[in-house]
Amino acid sequence: MDLKTQESTIPLSLKVLNKAHVFLREVHLLLLFKIDSAAGKYLSAINHYEIHKRLNYSIFNEKKSKQLAEMEVAYETAEKEKDLALLRSKDKLQKKELQKSSQSKEYLSAIATVLLVLFMVVFSRYRLKQKSNMQLLAQQKEINVQNAELIGLTTVQ
């Protein structure tokens, strides 16, 4: 094992040693309580029992604090996952709405194009009909002029 690996294990070793020390001290105090009780040293026994209980209570509180912290982390994780799922759902919905909006714009554009082409065809036909009517009017005038000339010739004779 190299020096760096050994140095990295020191904090873990100290933590384990500290826990073992606290556990051994608790057991030691409980044994002293029992020995003092058996020997009739009740004041010393009560003193050892009180210290044992405080240490036991301290260990219990540490465990509960750790469990509470773990539960808080689990709760926060679940909430964040729920929020993330909600955001994903909203994102999907927005994408669908954007797609619908884009499709609507495309349809509207296609309809406008068709209407514009239709208008251009109708307008072209209207102009063509107007031109034909003008030509017919011109021919009608010419015919009327020729008729008038013929009538004038026939009346002269």
Image: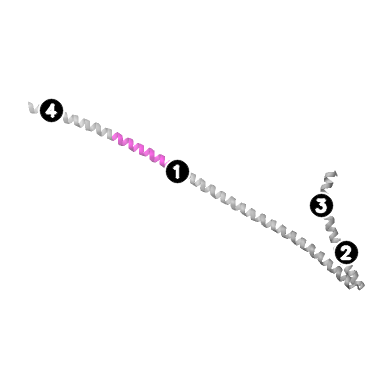
Across and down, in percent, residue 29 comes to 87, 65
Q: Nearer the viewer, residue 47 or 116?
A: 47
Instruction: Give me the C-alpha separation between circle 2 and circle 1.
Output: 86 Å
Q: Is the magenta stretch mostly helix, strand or loop?
A: helix
The answer to whether the residue labelled 1 contacts the one labelled 4, judged by CB atoms less than 8 Å apart, is no
The disc at residue 24 is: none
The answer to whether the residue labelled 2 contacts the one labelled 1, judged by CB atoms less than 8 Å apart, is no
Relative to residue 64, is residue 101 depicted above or below?
A: above
Name the mark nearer the viewer: 2 or 4.
Answer: 2
Instruction: Give me the C-alpha separation between circle 1 and circle 3.
Output: 68 Å
Q: At x 22% / y 31%, what residue is drawn?
A: 138
Residue at which label 1 appears: 107
Query: Mark 1 vs mark 4: which is more N-terminal?
Result: 1
Name the mark nearer the viewer: 1 or 3.
Answer: 3
Q: At x 86% / y 62%, what residue is drawn?
A: 25
Name the mark nearer the viewer: 2 or 1.
Answer: 2
Across and down, in percent, residue 38 comes to 91, 72
Residue at which label 3 appears: 12
Relative to residue 114, is residue 64 depicted above or below?
A: below
Relative to residue 121, is residue 17 depicted above or below?
A: below
Quarter the N terminus occupies? top right
Relative to residue 108, is residue 64 depicted above or below?
A: below
The disc at residue 28 is: 2
Instruction: Give me the C-alpha separation between circle 2 and circle 4.
Output: 149 Å
Query: Mark 2 vs mark 4: which is more N-terminal?
Result: 2
